[in-house]
Amino acid sequence: MCPQVGKEVTIVVRNTGAHRRVFVPLWNDWTAPSPETLTYKGTVVKNNYWMNVDEFNMTTGQKDFPIRTIRLKNVLLIDGVKIDQRAAGGITTKTIKGSKGNQYTVTLNNGVAEKCTCPAFIYRGGQCKHLALASVC
């Protein structure tokens, strides 16, 4: 589901902007809605270590904004191929073995790891190494 690093891709994503319709009090009217989708073209580059497992980076071709981060759950098309999030598997679970032999259950939503039963995920803000091990990317 994740595009490969170094590959040039065209991505169509859902426009998830918080203000898709904006109220303009001066005119007491609504502005035109933003587009439902956005299209980006660029080269996939290596993720930064602090990124979530369901994100990837791509170049923008702009000097002041060289890298864009895309969340997999918002991707609709990659190079014209439809990404059907429901067909990607829905909600599933994987059992991951911890470094000390414990087993943890990771919940995946359409192939993207979202939750883990390990103490690190519960007590340290929702990030752990098991998410990366279980994710499709």
Image (tube, rainbow, N blue to C red):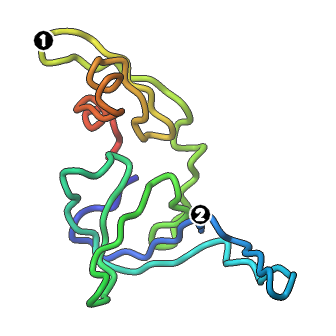
Q: Residues within 10 Å of mark 2 (few under 14, many from 20)?
A: few
In the rendered structure, are the residues bearing label 2 and label 1 in contact, judged by CB atoms less than 8 Å apart? no
Q: Residues within 10 Å of mark 1 (few under 14, many from 20)?
A: few
Residue ranking furthest to the right: 28
Question: Which one is in front in this view, the residue at disc 2 or the one at disc 1?
Answer: 2
In this rendering, the answer to whether 35 lies above or below 26 is above
For the residues labelled 2 and 1, the Cα–Cα distance comes to 40 Å
Relative image position of residue 94 (x, y in whole percent): 38, 23
| Residue visible at 73% across and 75% down in the picture | 22
| Residue visible at 74% across and 73% down in the picture | 21
Residue ranking furthest to the front: 26
Q: Amino acid at mark 2?
A: Thr
In this rendering, the answer to whether 105 lies above or below 85 is above
Q: Amino acid at mark 1?
A: Lys
Which disc number belongs to residue 16? 2
Relative image position of residue 35 (x, y in whole percent): 67, 77
Q: Secondary structure at mark 1?
A: loop
Residue 120 lies in quadrant: top left
Where does label 1 land, which residue? 100
Which disc number belongs to residue 17? none
Q: Secondary structure at mark 2?
A: loop
N-terminal label among 2 and 1: 2
Relative image position of residue 34 (x, y in whole percent): 68, 78
